[in-house]
Amino acid sequence: MVRSLTRAAALIGWARREYGGRAEKAGTVGLWLLIGLLLVVGVVDARQYLVTGIIVGSIIALGALGITLIFGILKFAHFAHGDMMMFGAYIALAALVGGGSIGPLSFGWGMIFAILVSMAVLAAVSVAIDRVVYRPLRRRGSSTVVLAIASLGIAIMLRAIMLLWWGPDQQLYVYGIHPARELPFDIMLKPDQIFIVATSILLMALVYLLLFRTKMGKAMRAMSDNADLARVSGIDTEQVVMWTWMIGGALAAVAGILLGIQSNLKPELGFTLLLPLFAGAILGGLGSPQGALVGAMIVGISQEVFVGIDLPFPPFGVPGYKPAVAFGILILVLLVRPRGLFGKT
Amino acid sequence: MTVLEARDVVSGYGEVEILHGVSIKVEEREIVTIIGPNGAGKSTLLKTVFGLLPCKRGAIFLDGENVTGQPPQALVRRGMCYVPQSDNVFPTLTVQENLEMGAFIRRDNYRAKIEEVLALFPDVIERRHTRAGKLSGGQRQMLALGRALMLEPRLLLLDEPSASLAPNMVQLVFAKIQDINRSGVSIVMVEQNARESLKLSHRGYVLAMGQNRLEGSGESLLESEEVGRLYLGD
């Protein structure tokens, strides 16, 4: 199995060297065709899974957006992002007071308040970590590999804090049974899940406005393009970095909370999220916000739809293979189009 | 009045010393060109003046004040702007956004300034919503100049503004540089295109091996036998 995989990889590598640009073009077309096929299969054969995929995808998208922004500005892979999401989810759990419910949702206004508190806390924590850990490393001229490994250390630290404080057991925001509603085309959906998708869309729209309509957002894009030129133009790059962490941290908080609403809270959940997060960000093209959104959606939908397709061999029909699907997408993209769907050349 | 003075500047990359004590002076409203063979340290001098490389010995004065070791952000606020030789626009930002980034530190309303700068460059005015990465080489150079003008600098440092441009574009870029100078901006530029740049310069310096070799008015350097032999291909 391993040998045949190595051989396949060598073959693809050879084809890329031999046919250069044409292979890249073919790879891209092939990738889009696969995505189209997946969507068609989802709509025809696995509608319920497709819907779940969109929900999961919209959660992954918020995390992948943060990863891609941080990568664009600071040029390193932020491995603590999954644990930061979970940390945000726990902060909201701590800040959640009062029950009740907003309309058909399982939670009340206390949850909205908890989300805002968690966003603020995570934004502050992210900036603090940058000041204490990443900025001294940057000033010393450390390579991006060093920064990435440092973020891995932060990830382990955050997880340990969560384990100590909240314990290893699974927790929920609201206990009790919240039945799904039946919708046309055999789709079952909980009101909470509509809240998840709506919140995600709202935040992504806000990030879009920030990046393309505000001066700070444009400076973030400028720094992502060319940090040296940004500095030469008089842009305060440390201020840009601070904003990037605040936005990345706040988005991670919401992503973690939405994940907690969709499934549950558990300290080690954050780490297992890293794979789909990075698969989504890389599929879209690291550094591209639009890419992160599309890439994360595709990863979320593929993970679920593969489970929903009824074929007698893996990864079809077995939920345990979800991470394998994300990993498979990651490998495929890195082989045929390393810069991702929307990445810069 | 002297706008810029670099006095016995020693600088380089890390351990490698490239400038071994270079001095230049730029008076108000002057165009000063720095020429010299590859590796003479021309670009290194500009980068050191602009605080991108550490000035190991010597000193840099802006309007008579010692600004040695100040970072670019501080120098930009003092009215000195710099245009790098390559990668001098933000490719995924539109033309207009590039200009906005040039004005990043301005707290006032700079909309009018954007129109004013765009009017200087009719070539790019219609493409204000085009991504800078899609512009031609000449248009990019214009945009890079425009970005530096957004802060209304009194001194512009230009690193090879004519590099890799088509001949007719070189003329156009030089004409723009003269226009900018006539509006009251002092200019220091490093050039490979020695003949064309000396023609429009008030004064020039010749660097070689990280040291001052010659200096004089643009015309006198053009007529100098040594310069002709070494750098003009006569």
Image: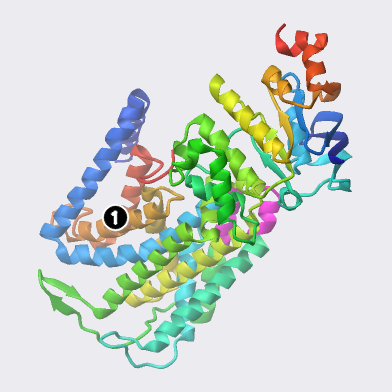
Residue A97: in magenta span: no
Nearest to the observer: residue B157 or residue A345: B157
Count numbered badges in the picture.
1
Three-letter amino acid code at the position of disc 1: Ile
Residue at image coords 66%, 28%? B160
Q: Which of B138 and B207 is in front in this view?
A: B138
Extent of the magenta region: A134-154
For mark 1, what is the residue? Answer: A298
Tell me where residue A266 appears, x and y as whole percent. Answer: 41, 74
In this rendering, the answer to whether A7 lies above or below A110 is above
Tell me: A302 left or right of B56: left
Q: What element carries label 1?
A: helix
Is A135 in the magenta?
yes
Q: Main secondary structure of the magenta part?
A: helix
Q: Which x, y percent locates residue B56?
A: 85, 39
Q: Which residue is drawn at 10% across and 70% down?
A: A186
Left/right of residue A214 with respect to residue B49 in the rendered view: left
- Placement of A6 over or under A82, stated as above or below: above
For image coordinates 33% across by 57% down, the residue present is A323
Q: In this view, does B88 lie to the left or right of A298?
A: right
Residue A294 vs residue B59, the one in the foreground: B59
Q: In which quarter of the image is residue B1?
A: top right
Label 1 Cα crowd, 10 Å radius (few <14 / some 14-19 / many 20+): many
Residue B165: image x %, image y %?
A: 55, 24
